[in-house]
């Protein structure tokens, strides 16, 4: 059966398994052309970042708990945690659900960055998340994400650019939006396969034949020739991905939900496709009512999932390649509400875990004194973009100022991965106690125990 030009074009577009094409063909082709330019900075060979988004606004005060503070217990007579805490130092402890995180902390593999936020905080879920995704509190840049900008600046035209990032889920987060090839959003390895249109008059076998016929077209337009190459690459790459990941066997038991997302990430990492960025998320942190039990359970699931993931990678000799960063769009208010919960607030902790992480407490813990609060909310002490800067410069060897369009001091929870990484700003060491002042270079690393 002869394949028509219209069929070639239609099926060629539908055959791209990890590409969602929105807008016109010229726009898509222009993005492809941009992706062929050389990166502006050198990148490290194989380091990987896994971002875990805690959606809903995690209550930082009941995550890293200032249990010895009178202001904390007075503000939270029903929610203040007094027992079964995991002590970090004389002032701060971890929530009872974070046993796995305490184990990582004691192994010096968990950095806890206190008081993360930004000027003029926003308490809307959507707007706050956009700020964290774009690293742009003032909304002055385009709508690309901070990780998307990394892909644009540092991964274009590289050997792994076609699969430099993967999102686990059904909807691409704004953090990964970029100007180059679209980032795939998957929920299983089986999603890496040629997609056929269920509404078509052709069956899947016929559409596969049409894709093969694309490569026999010599008089085609540049757009159709491009589709021919992309369709063929899609078939080859999808088969390679499924073949290489088929032999993966986890060395740990992963819990449900987030654990299964991280298991999928471990499977792809084990396949060694050169993917540098992974993104996943877990919800439920919008704890306006009956917070105590559900919040502890959520934190337990997060910590045991991340610990299992790192153990699995360690058993496979891959742990030194990966760091995990966990964040939420905002914290909660200091005062508990009338529904045994907490409402939208501001600053909160960020977590970075991994075998190569210099564990400890970083940044100053926000003051709970009444005259130091911002209308009942914590004042941030560490700009969250300092964490991004640290990951970009010290782990991916990228020019963070180009990616973030601004310069921020890196923290000291990661060492230098390459001599060409920019290191002009002084590093900050872990802090030993809470402080009311904005984050500044601190003393010596804290003692753990």
Image (cartoon, rainbow, N blue to C red):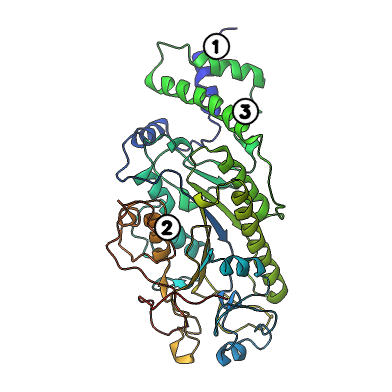
* 232 over 1 or under it: above or below: below
Q: Residue furthest top?
A: 1
Q: Secondary structure at mark 1?
A: loop
Q: Which residue appears at 43% of the width and 37% of the height?
A: 161
| Residue 252 picture location, percent across and down | 70, 51
The part of the image, by quadrant, that contains residue 212 is top right
- The quarter in which the N terminus is drawn is top right
Image mark for residue 348: none
Disc 1 vs disc 2: which is toward the camera?
2
* Front-most of residues 110 and 300: 110
- The quarter in which the C terminus is drawn is bottom right
The residue identified by callout 3 is 197
| Residue 410 picture location, percent across and down | 36, 64
| Residue 14 picture location, percent across and down | 55, 28
Residue 304 left/right relative to 322: right
Give the mark nearest the N terminus, 2 or 3. Answer: 3
Disc 2 vs disc 3: which is toward the camera?
2
Give the mark nearest the N terminus, 1 or 2. Answer: 1
Q: CA distance from mark 2 to mark 3?
A: 40 Å
Q: Is residue 329 visible?
A: no
Residue 270 left/right relative to 346: right
The residue identified by callout 1 is 3
Q: Which residue appears at 51% of the width and 22% of the height?
A: 232
Q: CA distance from mark 1 to mark 2?
A: 50 Å
* Front-most of residues 79 and 376: 79
* 32 over 94 or under it: above or below: above
Q: Which residue appears at 47% of the width and 26% of the height?
A: 230
The residue identified by callout 2 is 391
Q: Determine whether label 1 and label 2 are within 8 Å by CB.
A: no
């Amino acid at each position: 059966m002869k394949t028509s030009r219209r069929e070639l074009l239609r099926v060629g577009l539908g055959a791209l398994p990890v590409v969602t094409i929105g807008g016109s063909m010229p726009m898509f082709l222009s993005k492809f052309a941009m992706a062929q330019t050389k990166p502006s900075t050198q990148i490290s060979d194989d380091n990987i970042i896994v971002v875990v988004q805690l959606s809903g606004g995690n209550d930082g005060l009941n995550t890293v708990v200032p249990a010895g503070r009178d202001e904390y217990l007075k503000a939270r007579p029903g929610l203040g945690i007094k027992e079964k805490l995991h002590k970090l130092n004389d002032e701060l402890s971890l929530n009872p659900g974070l046993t796995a995180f305490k184990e990582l902390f004691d192994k010096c593999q968990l950095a806890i960055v206190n008081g993360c936020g930004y000027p003029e905080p926003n308490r809307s879920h959507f707007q706050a998340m956009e700020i964290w995704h774009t690293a742009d509190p003032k909304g002055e840049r385009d709508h690309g994400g901070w990780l998307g900008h990394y892909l644009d600046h540092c991964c274009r035209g590289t050997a792994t650019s076609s699969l430099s990032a993967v999102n686990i889920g059904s909807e691409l987060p704004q953090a990964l939006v970029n100007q180059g090839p679209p980032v795939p959003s998957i929920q299983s390895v089986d999603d890496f396969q040629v997609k056929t249109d269920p509404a078509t008059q052709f069956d899947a076998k016929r559409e596969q034949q049409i894709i093969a016929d694309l490569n026999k077209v010599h008089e085609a337009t540049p757009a159709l020739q491009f589709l021919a190459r992309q369709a063929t690459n899609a078939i080859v790459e999808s088969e390679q991905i499924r073949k290489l990941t088929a032999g993966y066997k986890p060395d740990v038991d992963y819990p449900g939900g987030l654990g299964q997302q991280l298991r999928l990430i471990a499977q792809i990492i084990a396949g060694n496709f050169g993917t540098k960025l992974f993104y996943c998320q877990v919800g439920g942190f919008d704890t306006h009512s009956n917070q105590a039990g559900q919040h502890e359970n959520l934190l337990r699931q997060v910590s045991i999932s991340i610990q299992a993931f790192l153990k699995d990678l360690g058993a496979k000799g891959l742990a030194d390649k990966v760091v995990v960063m966990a964040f939420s769009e905002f914290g909660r208010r200091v005062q508990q509400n009338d529904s045994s919960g907490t409402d939208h607030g501001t600053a909160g902790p960020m977590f970075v875990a991994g075998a190569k992480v210099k564990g400890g407490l970083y940044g100053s813990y926000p003051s709970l004194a009444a005259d130091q609060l911002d209308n009942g909310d914590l004042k941030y002490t560490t700009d969250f973009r300092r964490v991004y800067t640290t990951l970009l410069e010290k782990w991916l060897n990228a020019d963070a100022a180009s990616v973030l369009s601004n310069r921020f001091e890196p923290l000291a929870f990661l060492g230098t991965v390459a001599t060409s990484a920019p290191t002009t700003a002084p590093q900050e060491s872990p802090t030993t106690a809470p402080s009311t002042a904005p984050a500044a270079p601190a003393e010596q690393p804290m003692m753990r125990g």
